[in-house]
């Protein structure tokens, strides 16, 4: 008889243990879901292109100094140009000289005017710039880069047009360094058979 008494008690304990595990398994997915939601929210906030619902998009304001000018620095190869633009009739002065005198080649002048033509702002801004380093071609590219960035500072709405034309990107191509055991960067010394 003692065996029969212990059997129902053991079954009762087993039933309690099963019910306890069932309640634990029922609660566990709810806890996992909340962790998954938290992880998803954290990942969404860390993603670089994710739009955050609580932040509003604030339009960029023009960056203009006290004299009504926008300033930018342009670079190309070894040339560095400091550029100021202000509303005017399209006069361009480079290192104190007129652009036709400083850049005698028509190609260089065309390069400098490209940002204005793409943005439909030809003859609407005066440009004053100082440029140092490099040759005339690199200096023309540096002035173009500076004009593009200054236009963006003056009129932030022009960014898509200038970006699509590739005027805001600094051209990374520079002279390749000379290597030892070679005459120049890639040129080998003259080969002598004897």
Image: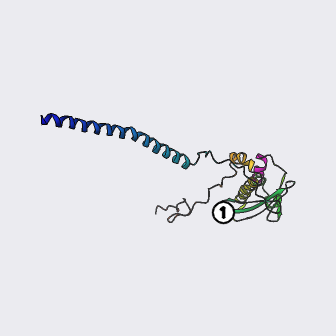
User: Residue at position x 76%, y 57% from top?
Assistant: 63
Question: Please, is residue 185 above or below residue 52 in the view?
Answer: below
Toward the right, the furthest residue is 89
Q: x%, y% of residue 99? A: 81, 59
Question: Which residue is under mark 1?
Answer: 78
Q: x%, y% of residue 124? A: 84, 51
For the N terminus, the image quarter is top left
Count of marks overlaid on the render: 1
Secondary structure mostly seen in the magenta stretch = helix
Left/right placement of residue 89 relative to residue 48 reads right
Nearest the eye: 49 or 14: 14
Q: x%, y% of residue 65? A: 79, 62
Left/right placement of residue 168 relative to residue 184 reads right
Q: x%, y% of residue 186? A: 54, 59
Q: Tag 1's secondary structure?
A: loop
The residues colored magenta run: 111-119
Nearest the eye: 107 or 181: 107
User: Residue at position x 64%, y 48% from top?
Assistant: 55
Left/right placement of residue 142 relative to residue 31 reads right
Nearest the eye: 14 or 116: 14
Toward the left, the furthest residue is 1
């Amino acid at each position: 008889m003692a065996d029969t008494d212990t059997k129902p008690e053991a079954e009762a304990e087993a039933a309690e243990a099963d019910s306890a595990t069932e309640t634990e398994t029922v609660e566990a997915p709810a806890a996992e879901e909340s962790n998954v939601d938290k992880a998803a929210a954290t990942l969404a906030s860390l993603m670089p292109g994710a739009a955050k619902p609580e932040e509003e998009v604030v339009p960029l304001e023009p960056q203009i100094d006290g004299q009504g000018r926008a300033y930018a620095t342009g670079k190309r190869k070894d040339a560095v140009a400091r550029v100021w633009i202000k509303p005017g009739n399209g006069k361009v002065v480079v290192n104190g000289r007129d652009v036709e005198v400083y850049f005698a080649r028509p190609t260089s002048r065309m390069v400098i005017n490209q940002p204005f033509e793409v943005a439909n702002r030809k003859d609407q801004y005066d440009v004053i710039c100082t440029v140092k380093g490099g040759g005339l071609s690199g200096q023309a590219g540096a002035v173009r880069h500076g004009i593009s960035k200054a236009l963006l500072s003056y009129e932030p709405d022009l960014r898509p047009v200038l970006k699509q034309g590739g005027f805001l990107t600094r051209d990374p191509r520079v002279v390749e360094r000379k290597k030892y055991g070679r005459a120049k960067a890639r040129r080998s010394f003259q080969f002598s058979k004897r």
